[in-house]
Image (cartoon, grey):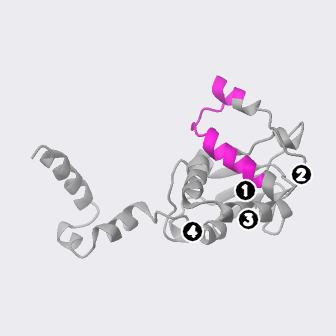
């Protein structure tokens, strides 16, 4: 068939990792999970594999707001968050499979907090997180960033500079 060549190439590559005679022990789904990870984001696993820097710790109010915001996200939004900070949409299966820890670092900023977005460092699996003060602000700012700031390594492009200067329209009420 027209795809035989490509399928054989995939099989040869897979056989370098798993002997062909063992492949029959797994369903396609089990094999997908072993190779790609779970399609849903395990926030408890991510939390166990997170380190905090620059004044943040697990009990800091901003960090509590952060985890609450992520828990409120849909599965798709959680995958977008991973893509934003890591360039991947799935987590490893076990803590020992993380090459790097997820890092949350207090972001220092100048100007109004309402105009400040979190900054991702995909090479370091790291997020510079402003000290947002309300659940709504935390959720809205992260969602804006993960949906509108997805260009990896494009920090110094005209589009990134324009996005950094985006002015937010906040409602008068807090959460």
What's the magenta bit mostly, secondary-structure-wise? helix
Marks 4/2: CA–CA distance: 32 Å
Front of the two marks 3 and 1:
3
> Can the viewer see residue 154?
yes
Q: Label 1: which residue?
A: 104
Front of the two marks 3 and 2:
2
Question: Which callout, 1 or 2, points at the residue further toward the start of the chain?
Answer: 1
Q: Quadrant of the C terminus?
A: bottom right
Q: Secondary structure at mark 3?
A: helix
Over which residues does the magenta segment extend? 138-162
**136 w.r.t. 93: above or below:** above
What's the mark number on residue 68?
A: 3
Q: Nearer the viewer, residue 10 or 112?
A: 112
Q: Secondary structure at mark 1?
A: strand
The residue carrying pointer 1 sits among few (fewer than 14), some (14 to 19) or many (20 or more) residues within 10 Å by Cα, namely: many
Q: Are marks 4 and 2 in contact (CB under 8 Å)?
A: no
Q: Is residue 129 magenta?
A: no
Front of the two marks 1 and 4:
4
Question: Which callout, 1 or 4, points at the residue further toward the start of the chain?
Answer: 4
Front of the two marks 4 and 3:
3
**Residue at point 62%, 67% (across, down):** 43
Question: Which callout, 4 or 2, points at the residue further toward the start of the chain?
Answer: 4
The residue carrying pointer 3 sits among few (fewer than 14), some (14 to 19) or many (20 or more) residues within 10 Å by Cα, namely: some
Marks 4/3: CA–CA distance: 14 Å
Front of the two marks 1 and 2:
2
Q: Label 2: which residue?
A: 173
Q: Label 4: which residue?
A: 42
Q: Are marks 3 and 1 in contact (CB under 8 Å)?
A: no
Question: Which callout, 3 or 1, points at the residue further toward the start of the chain?
Answer: 3
Q: Are marks 1 and 4 in contact (CB under 8 Å)?
A: no
């Amino acid at each position: 068939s027209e795809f035989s060549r490509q399928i054989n190439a995939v099989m040869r590559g897979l056989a370098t990792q798993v002997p062909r005679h063992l492949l029959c022990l797994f369903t396609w789904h089990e094999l997908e999970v072993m190779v790609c990870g779970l399609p849903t984001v395990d926030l408890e696993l991510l939390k166990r594999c997170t380190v905090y820097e620059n004044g943040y710790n697990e009990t800091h109010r901003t960090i509590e707001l952060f985890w609450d915001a992520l828990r409120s996200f849909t599965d798709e939004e959680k995958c977008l968050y991973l893509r934003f900070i890591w360039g991947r949409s799935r987590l490893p299966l076990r803590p020992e499979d993380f090459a790097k820890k997820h890092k949350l670092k207090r972001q220092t900023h100048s100007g109004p907090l309402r105009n400040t977005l979190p900054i991702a460092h995909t090479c370091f699996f790291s997020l510079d997180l402003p000290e947002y003060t309300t659940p709504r602000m935390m959720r809205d700012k992260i969602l804006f960033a993960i949906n509108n700031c997805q260009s990896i390594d494009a920090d110094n492009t005209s589009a990134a500079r324009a996005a950094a200067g985006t002015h937010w329209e906040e409602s008068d009420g807090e959460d």
